[in-house]
Image: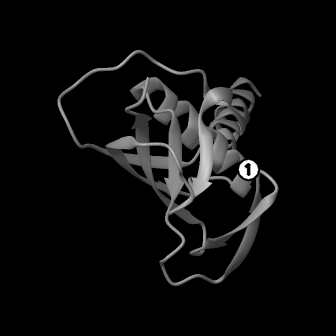
Amino acid sequence: MSRFFRFFSLAFLSLLVVGCAGPTINVAKLSGESYPSVAPDKVAVVATGGLKRPYKEIGIFDVEEGPGSQTYDEMIQALRVRAGAMGADAVLIDTSTRNQGMMPVGGMLMAINGKSIKAVAVRWTDR
């Protein structure tokens, strides 16, 4: 009975960990500079070409759905957390890729490419 209980407990915990895993985020820093972090809720999410302020690109992000299904809102939130930690003031979502539909983000519709999001992290230069 003890072996069965240990096996069942280990299997359950493994499924729990895999099911709660977040999206996979690949980041390419575009400079060696470091910036103070920005709170995730302060990182703006904007469609490519939608910024009116001058900015500097500081990173490229590729966010893909990880084990366990995430919503696009969860993927965007994970992107905001990582971009904010890098010091980004905004992320520009690439809407030029071939898409399979649209998703609502922050009151606007953005093109999606399956369950992946491509974005550029930017920092304001007019601070």
Q: Residue 34: percent from the left, percent from the top?
A: 28, 21
Q: Which residue occupies the foreground of this view, 56 or 19?
A: 56
Seen at 34% across and 20% down, the residue is 35
Query: Closest to the observer: 43 or 14?
Result: 43
Left or right for 89, reference 125: right
110 or 25: nearer the viewer: 110
Q: Note whether 79 is above or below 42 in the view shown.
A: below
Q: Which residue is mark 1?
A: 73
Q: Position of residue 37 (x, y in %)?
A: 46, 18
Whether residue 70 is visible here, answered yes or no, is no
Image position of 120 (left or right of 21)? left
State which quadrant residue 102 falls in.
Answer: bottom right
Viewer can see residue 52: yes
Pick whichever, 81 or 39, lies toward us. 39
Is the residue marked by circle 1 packed among few (<14), some (14-19), or many (20+) residues within 10 Å? Answer: few
Q: Quadrant of residue 39?
A: top right
Q: Is residue 124 above or below residue 24?
A: above
